[in-house]
Image (tube, grey):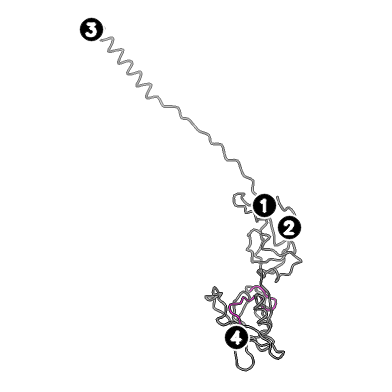
Amino acid sequence: MLRLGLLLVALVAGGLAAWLVFAARPQPVVTTVVAPAPEVPLQDVLVASSDLLPAQTLTKETLRWQAWPPSALNPVYITRSSRPDALNALAGAIVRNRISVGEPIREENLIPRHAGFLATMLPAGKRAMAVRTSAESTAGGFIKPNDRVDVLHNDGQAHVRTILRNVRVLAIDNVVDDTSKDEKANVIGKTATLELDPSQAEVLTAAQATGMISLSLRSVADNDDYRQQDRQTIRIIRAGRTEIVTQ
């Protein structure tokens, strides 16, 4: 009986030792291999190879193709796959808005080569009209394109009225960009081209025929004030002569 008990104890001890040896064995390491993501081919996008200014004419040298990630593509960008002839097709077009180097070229920022530049700058319903200017009538020559001004009328009898307010200056002579480094941009212009609606153009035409026009430069802080003049300005004809009357 004692021998049988010793045998059972030996069997249990052996089984326990075998289990401990098996449990202590290192488990196999499972390695997961992640397949690399497939490379997405880049798209060639037409961009400016240098800073482009308004009214500048495009050439092949001012344009270049640049690789662009598909995730950042905009439908308005010009790609080589859709417009392989873009370098030749767009040469001669005129820049409408400033374009920085490396910025994608968009059709909406270009003017066809045979279109008039100033006409394409005008918003719908607006007119461009030039007025004679001098240093005295343009704040000493400090009025530049894209400034906003009030238009004053002097009837020659010391009666001065503001006939138009918050009018945008499109150009001084033929300069349409106030950041131009051309020396001519610093010369006091002889004409200022203003952006007007049709009724304002009529008022200004009558005013030029009946007196002297001056431009008063507005503060940038007031440029968001698009209210019309406090008093209504109309033109009438008396004895065959056009006059400006403010009511």
Q: Residue furthest left?
A: 2
Q: Quadrant of residue 171?
A: bottom right
Q: Quadrant of the N terminus?
A: top left
Of 18 and 158, the residue lying toward us: 158
Q: Earlier in the sequence, mark 2 or mark 1?
A: 1
Q: Quadrant of the C terminus?
A: bottom right
Task: Give x and y (percent) for residue 63.
Answer: 69, 60
Q: CA distance from mark 4 to mark 2?
A: 55 Å
Q: Secondary structure at mark 2?
A: helix
Span shown in magenta: 163-177
Q: Residue furthest top?
A: 1
| Label 1 sits on residue | 44
Disc number lying in front (3 or 1): 1
Disc number lying in front (4 or 2): 4
**The label number, if any, that marks residue 246 in the structure image:** 4
The answer to whether 54 is drawn above or below residue 129 in the figure is: above
What amino acid is found at the position of numbered circle 2 in the picture?
Answer: Leu
Q: Give the residue displayed 69% in from the left and 57% down from the top.
A: 64
Q: Earlier in the sequence, mark 3 or mark 4?
A: 3
| Label 3 sits on residue | 2
Determine contact: label 4, label 1, CB under 8 Å.
no
Q: Earlier in the sequence, mark 3 or mark 1?
A: 3
Q: CA distance from mark 3 to mark 1?
A: 92 Å
Q: Give the residue displayed 64% in from the left and 64% down from the top.
A: 99
| Label 2 sits on residue | 87
